[in-house]
Image (tube, rainbow, N blue to C red):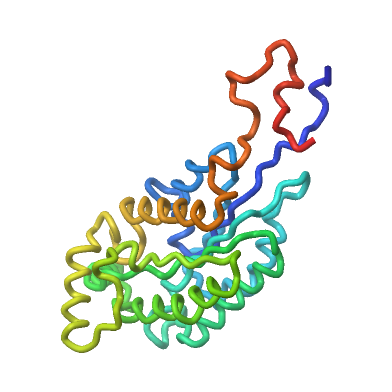
Amino acid sequence: MMGTSVIHDVAQDQIVLLGDSITQISFGNGGFGSVLADHYQRRLDVINRGLSGYNTKWVKPVVRSILATTLPGTGAATLRLVTVFLGANDSVFAGGEQYVSLPEFSDNLNEIITTIRSAVPEAKVILISPPPLHEARMGAIWEERGFPKDRSFDNALAYYRASRDEVGLPWEERDASVAFLDLFTTLLGAEDRDTGRVGKEHTEWAERVQAEKLGEDVLPDGLHLGPTAGKLLGEALIDLIAKKWNELAANNIQHLMPWHSDIDKDNLPDSLFVNARN
């Protein structure tokens, strides 16, 4: 029987969540990060690398360093999945310090995904679209805090479209290891998806979906995800992962250590390490 001084490789593979403040706070109550961490408990470690206030211009140079220093340093564990969730800050009005133009935003997202695919070829990548915005609620809260209004629903829509049409869908078509998650439509519902409305039809649609679909449980401050939105995004990620890469479905990943009911009590401690990599 092995002594307890033997070190076994019991590292878990990882999911890394890369993004801005929406990702940074996603381990809070009802956040999508907490939904993923709960779903993958004892199967995958969910690592939060959300950077509040960051845009694609500022995230792009740090991606390779984040990946290199986040990967497990010992053992055989690997990075299995990276989510990229950016755009809410890029879409501030032109002239704001976080502003990134639409062409540069698309280029930056493409470079970020290229970097991930190059640095960790075995990892899957999910690009999450920027969410919609409740313009009036965010504007009122920003005013209370002494900040100028710096975002609009239409700007958020434009950056969502760029993430979808210029980045997410093209990557999805040419690389089976990349997927696009349409958060805009997830929150508004398929019946209110973006169909390129213009003029009065667009204005009426934008006003209605903000009033009917983006309540305080969805976007409490008009920008960040509330518990309802966090749950929707977490569940959408779980569904997408299982459908596109079934090997990453939780029930297809070996759990850490045997279940307590399966431990061979007459063969301790060896029986505790039957799932170990060594």
Q: Residue at x 59, y 49 (%)?
A: 247
Q: Residue at x 75, y 14 (%)?
A: 267
Q: Is residue 262 above or below residue 23?
A: above
Q: Is residue 197 above or below residue 26?
A: below
Which quarter of the figure is the N terminus placed in? top right
Front residue (pair 195, 86): 195
Q: Residue at x 44, y 76 (%)?
A: 164
User: Furthest residue to the top?
Assistant: 266
Q: Is residue 60 above or below residue 8?
A: below
Front residue (pair 222, 174): 174
- List x then y, in percent, for residue 152: 30, 78
Front residue (pair 150, 184): 184
- List x then y, in percent, for residue 207: 18, 74
| Horizontal side, residue 1 vs residue 13: left or right | right
Q: Quadrant of residue 250?
A: top right
Front residue (pair 233, 63): 233
Q: Residue at x 68, y 16 (%)?
A: 264
Total marks in image: 0
- List x then y, in percent, for residue 224: 36, 62
- List x then y, in percent, for residue 111: 61, 77
| Horizontal side, residue 26 vs residue 178: left or right | left
Which quarter of the figure is the C terminus placed in? top right
